[in-house]
Image (spheres, rainbow, N blue to C red):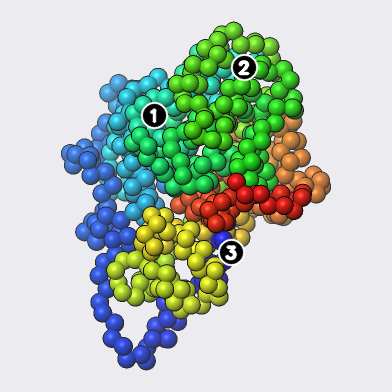
């Protein structure tokens, strides 16, 4: 999908040469609301949180001391934050307003703040303490979780059992139940979004990220494709879903907790999607023979492809395996599960580092070129681009796209389904699809790891890349990652192998939330034919409609 617009290059000077001798007088263009998400940039800094009192803006430094960096995402940086009065250690997510390129980006931040402000206090959900806004950033002050990610804690403990998995599953189900009772659909449940509050053995596990969450009413259906590849429910890919998707994601986490690998896996995103839609669960490989039938029963019911037959969060909590969690087998599941979880966690860490490099190379300045392209194509100056305008505009900027590709582009981009593209939709397609599919960004990420410029990521370079505050990775983990990524078995990772790794099950939202949305909507449309999803089996060559 991205490749089909790679040929679009906009040259304002070339267009001016083309029109210099034309006698048709063009009218003066009015401001575009999507060019300026809130219509405020021309009058000063955009205001993201209109409900935050003016007296409460730009005052974060009066109340808190910002310390070292804890993490980094597409829109901003999370810092250690200390309350000047109480000395309480907190976390502050500072979102750069310059990086909120579209109305969709701004709305995402507003919705996250609204949801975190309205859900009741819960021992397993990180609490939003305060919000601030100044000319440059939006600041979200939250509880600090410094106990590490879920899988890292499991691996570090050494002794890992079915009983421990049941305890984690109960916590996740409690979070889902609380969200649904308060009209919130999380939409992005995955292990990385659960952190331990501290390093104590009895530390609470907390859900930390509500960036893709949405408010819903009973019976309301959603079509936007969001989430992370391995954890998406089949109805998300079919673009017709409700809160049941959270139980599916929790079921995927439980499956991984019990055996160490995702239930639906493939080497490409389309392969992952097809595996999800087929819904075939593997209970044959180790350690499933050691796992109780009650645990398997719960996994099957949480991963029922039919959302009307899937368990609710309350039914998960009422399931005998959860109810009798303290009686669940306390026999270690074996080194194989811990080894798999460690590899899964390290592979995610490797991809996150690569995505961080890619995110930093998404140029803010390039938005100006896209803005000019939008203005050029919007012939009737109504702030929207129709299909005829898109077709004519692409031709005007030198695109060689055919009619079917342009129609596909239009369908993928039209998020709100109104038959035309607003500025936010246009930016998502042109900037994110064009740039992210561009070889330059994979190349930049590869060079970040290939420190000596040899053209290969070697074992020592991989070790250095994966060493962080948690220490160095084990040799066994490095060997496992090398074995998985190094397909030609020469003991190092070349560029092509790196690209294949990045395209398999990667959470692209770490680099670009808009790109992630468009990428999976494109995938869904490609799978959809005449209202049915067609699954192609590469082994038999047959296609099956579901």
| Residue name at image x 56 percent, y 54 percent | 528
Residue 39, quarter of the rendered image: bottom left
Q: Residues within 10 Å of mark 3 (few under 14, many from 20)?
A: few
Residue 126 in the image: state x and y as whole percent: 40, 27
Residue contact at pointers 2 and 1, CB within 8 angstroms: no
Residue that badge 2 annotates: 294
Q: Hey, which residue is sitting farthest top in the picture?
A: 327
Residue 367, quarter of the rendered image: bottom left
| Residue name at image x 61 percent, y 21 percent | 297
Asked if residue 36 is positioned above or below residue 195 in the image, the reply reads: below
The secondary structure type at the circle numbered 1 is helix
Residues 495 and 520: in front is: 520
Q: Earlier in the sequence, mark 3 or mark 1?
A: 3
**Separation of disc 2 and disc 1 at Cα?**
25 Å
The secondary structure type at the circle numbered 2 is helix
Asked if residue 26 is positioned above or below residue 221 in the image, the reply reads: below
Residue 490 in the image: state x and y as whole percent: 82, 47
Residue contact at pointers 3 and 2, CB within 8 angstroms: no
Residue that badge 1 annotates: 180
Residue 462 in the image: state x and y as whole percent: 68, 41
The secondary structure type at the circle numbered 3 is helix
**Separation of disc 3 and disc 2 at Cα?**
47 Å
Residue that badge 3 annotates: 3
């Amino acid at each position: 999908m991205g490749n089909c617009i790679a040929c679009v290059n906009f040259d304002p000077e070339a267009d001016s040469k083309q029109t210099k001798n034309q006698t048709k007088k063009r009218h003066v263009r009015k401001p575009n609301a999507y060019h300026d998400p809130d219509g405020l940039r021309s009058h000063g800094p955009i205001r993201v949180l209109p409900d935050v009192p003016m007296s409460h803006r730009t005052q974060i430094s009066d109340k808190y001391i910002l310390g070292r960096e804890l993490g980094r995402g597409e829109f901003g940086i999370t810092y250690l934050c200390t309350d000047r009065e109480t000395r309480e250690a907190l976390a502050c997510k500072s979102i750069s307003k310059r990086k909120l390129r579209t109305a969709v980006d701004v709305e995402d931040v507003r919705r996250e703040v609204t949801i975190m402000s309205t859900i009741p206090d819960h021992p397993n959900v990180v609490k939003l303490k305060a919000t601030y806004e100044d000319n440059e950033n939006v600041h979200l002050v939250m509880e600090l979780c410094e106990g590490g990610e879920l899988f890292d804690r499991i691996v570090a403990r050494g002794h890992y059992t079915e009983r421990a998995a049941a305890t984690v599953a109960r916590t996740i189900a409690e979070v889902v139940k609380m969200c649904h009772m308060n009209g919130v659909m999380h939409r992005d449940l995955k292990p990385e979004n659960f952190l331990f509050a501290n390093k104590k053995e009895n530390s609470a596990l907390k859900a930390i990220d509500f960036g893709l969450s949405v408010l819903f009413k009973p019976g309301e259906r959603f079509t936007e494709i969001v989430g992370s590849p391995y954890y998406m429910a089949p109805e998300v890919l079919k673009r017709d879903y409700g809160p049941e998707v959270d139980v599916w994601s929790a079921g995927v986490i439980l499956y991984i907790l019990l055996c160490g690998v995702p239930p639906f896996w493939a080497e490409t995103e389309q392969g992952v999607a097809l595996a999800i839609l087929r819904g075939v669960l593997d209970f044959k490989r180790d350690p499933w023979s050691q796992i109780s039938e009650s645990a398997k029963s719960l996994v099957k019911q949480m991963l029922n492809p039919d959302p009307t037959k899937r368990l609710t969060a309350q039914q998960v909590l009422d399931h005998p395996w959860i109810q009798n969690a303290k009686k669940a087998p306390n026999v270690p599941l074996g080194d194989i599960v811990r080894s798999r979880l460690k590899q899964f966690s390290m592979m995610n860490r490797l991809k996150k580092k690569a995505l961080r490099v890619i995110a930093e190379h998404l140029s803010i300045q390039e938005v100006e070129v896209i803005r000019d392209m939008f203005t050029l194509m919007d012939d009737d100056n109504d702030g929207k681009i129709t299909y005829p305008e898109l077709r004519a505009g692409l031709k005007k900027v030198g695109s060689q796209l055919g009619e079917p590709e342009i129609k596909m582009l239009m369908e993928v981009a039209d998020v709100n389904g109104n038959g035309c593209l607003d500025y936010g939709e246009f930016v998502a397609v042109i900037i994110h699809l064009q740039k992210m599919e561009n070889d330059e960004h994979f190349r930049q990420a590869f060079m970040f790891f290939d420190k000596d410029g040899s053209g290969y990521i070697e074992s020592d370079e991989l070790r250095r890349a994966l060493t962080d505050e948690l220490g160095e990775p084990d040799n066994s983990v490095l060997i496992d990652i090398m074995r998985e990524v190094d397909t030609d078995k020469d003991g190092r990772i070349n560029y092509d192998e790196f690209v294949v790794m990045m395209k398999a099950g990667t959470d692209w939202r770490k680099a670009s939330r808009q790109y992630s949305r468009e990428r999976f909507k494109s995938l869904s449309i490609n799978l959809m034919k005449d209202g049915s999803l067609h699954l192609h089996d590469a082994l038999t060559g047959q296609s099956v409609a579901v």
